[in-house]
Image (tube, rainbow, N blue to C red):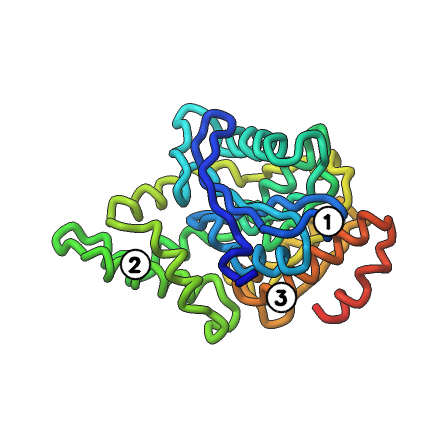
Amino acid sequence: MSAPERISARTIEVAGFRTRLLESVAPAEHDSGAPILLLHGYSDSADTWWRVLELLAHRGHRAAAIDLPGFGEADRLRPDEPMYVQYREVVAATCELLWGDEAPIIAGNSMGGALAFLCAEGRPSPAGIVPIGPAGFDHPGWFRVIEQQPLLRWALNDALPVPTPVLRSITSRVFRQLAYGDVSRAHPEDLERYARHVSSARDVRRLLATGRRLMGELVDPFALAQVDCPVLLVWGERDRMVSCRGARHVLAALPDARFERLAGVGHCPQLEVPELVCDLLGGFRWALRSQDWDAMDGLSAAA
């Protein structure tokens, strides 16, 4: 099977939203352990998991990623209801649609990492969660950093409409600078997938408005004492958007959580070091199945 065939894409309707689902295509007889649901961050889409999904499929793991409402190809959020309430409903409905009563691993980056924690506070609990650079700790000025990007501000100048190809080029350049610890690791295909969801300045303004709405929901959003499933916390030490110092709050509240700090890696490890992220997800999955955390020790050394 060639690499592109390892991922299937389809439209689904869950919790009242139409959205896009990406799934790893792996022979069922090669799979064991909990399925994995992958959640993207703010302004991103399921495409951020493309390389990880290919690797998971190659290794025989069941996994899927979705566009969360308001992003990618998903319907827009309902304006009169908190974002994370809607997202938790979408995650629960997606898991039920794909895997019935089987408890999944929920892994998420940034906004999706915060959502993984919030899903673990509810019942039924996931099999485990893997927050990657989760938002919501120390409430840093990540959104201000985005809004103040000079290229982005120039692109929003109504006096000089920016053609779509130029706007996408600007968007991908800003994303590359903010998302990677080492920009030389950025793949052009990943940047193109990220930027293709932006066609006009109106799209950028809508994303910025969603970001402002999100900021209000990320002020002390967690009840970590309610999280009783296994946790693997992953953070890039060169994360410019959400400082890895936020890990101290998680580890203080959840002393049994495993913490992987990735040297030289930025805000989106799934793009920058997809093989390592796949190793960590696979190791976590194996540890849950075997109930043996020592199974991850080799991966800890690699990280």
Q: Are marks 1 and 3 in contact (CB under 8 Å)?
A: no
Direction from residue 30 to residue 68 in the image, left or right: left
Asked if 178 appears above or below 13 in the picture, the reply is below
Q: Residue at x 50, y 42 (%)?
A: 21
**Residue underneath mark 3:** 275
Front residue of 150/256: it is 256
**Residue underneath mark 2:** 168
Tell me the kind of residue under disc 1: Glu
Eye-nearest disc, 3 or 2: 3
Q: Disc 1 and disc 3: Cα gap in Å?
A: 23 Å
Eye-nearest disc, 1 or 3: 1
Q: Is residue 113 visible?
A: no
Q: Earlier in the sequence, mark 3 or mark 2?
A: 2
Q: Are marks 2 and 1 in contact (CB under 8 Å)?
A: no
Determine whether the residue tagged by mark 1 lies in a helix, strand or loop. Answer: helix
Direction from residue 22 to residue 26 in the image, left or right: right
Q: Disc 3 and disc 2: Cα gap in Å?
A: 27 Å
Determine whether the residue tagged by mark 3 lies in a helix, strand or loop. Answer: helix
> What is the crowding at mark 2: few (fewer than 14 residues within 10 Å), some, or many (at least 20)?
many
Q: Disc 2 and disc 1: Cα gap in Å?
A: 41 Å
Tell me the number on the disc at residue 29.
Answer: 1
Q: Residue at x 51, y 62 (%)?
A: 240
Q: Residue at x 25, y 44 (%)?
A: 202
Tell me the kind of residue under disc 3: Glu
Direction from residue 188 to residue 166 in the image, left or right: left
Question: Residue 203's quadrant in the figure?
Answer: top left
Q: Residue at x 19, y 57 (%)?
A: 163
Front residue of 259/279: it is 279
Determine whether the residue tagged by mark 2 lies in a helix, strand or loop. Answer: helix
